[in-house]
Amino acid sequence: MCLALETELDTLATQLTSEQLVIAQQEADAKVIESEIAFLKTLLETTEKPTTQEQVDDFNESVDRHNKLLADYKKEAGKYSVMAKDYNAKLEKQKAASNNHNSQCAHKKYYESDMALAQHHH
C-alpha cells in the first residue's frame, strides 16, 4: 500500500514539474506581448498629432498593432489562467495524496505484499 502511494506521489510530482515549465513559458510569452503593448502605448501617447498622410498611416498602423496585441494578450492570459487553475487543482491532489501517505505510512516498514502490489501496478 505505501509503495503504491509513493509511486502515485512520484507520478504527480513529475506531472507538476512538467506542467510548471509549460506554465512558465506561457507566462513569459504573455509578458513579451505585455511589454510590446506598453511600448506602443507610450509611443502612441507621446506622438505629436500626425499632419502628413504618411504620419497618419504610421499612427493608424501603430493603433492597429496595439489593438491586435491587446487581443493576443487577452487570449494568452486566458490560456495562462486555465493552465494555472488546472495546475493548482493537481497540486491540491498531490497535497492530499502526500497527507494520505504521511498518515498511513509514516514510520512504517515495507512488507513483501507492498512490493508485490507496487510491482503489479507497473
Image (cartoon, rainbow, N blue to C red):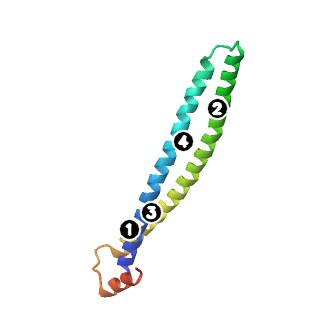
Above or below, 58 against 6 in this view is: above
Q: Which mark is residue 30?
A: 4
Question: Sequence-wise, which precedes: disc 2 or disc 1?
Answer: 1
Which residue in the protein does label 3 denote? 15
Which residue in the protein does label 1 denote? 10
Tag 4 and tag 1, C-beta contact below 8 Å? no
**Residue, x 37% and y 75% (percent of image)?**
104
Mark 3 to mark 1: distance in Å? 9 Å
Instruction: Specify the amino acid type for callout 1.
Output: Asp
Q: Nearer the viewer, mark 4 or mark 1?
A: 4
Tag 3 and tag 4, C-beta contact below 8 Å? no
Instruction: Specify the amino acid type for callout 2.
Output: Arg
Which residue in the protein does label 2 denote? 65
**Residue, x 68% and y 31% (percent of image)?**
64
Instruction: Specify the amino acid type for callout 4.
Output: Ala
Question: Sequence-wise, which precedes: disc 4 or disc 2?
Answer: 4
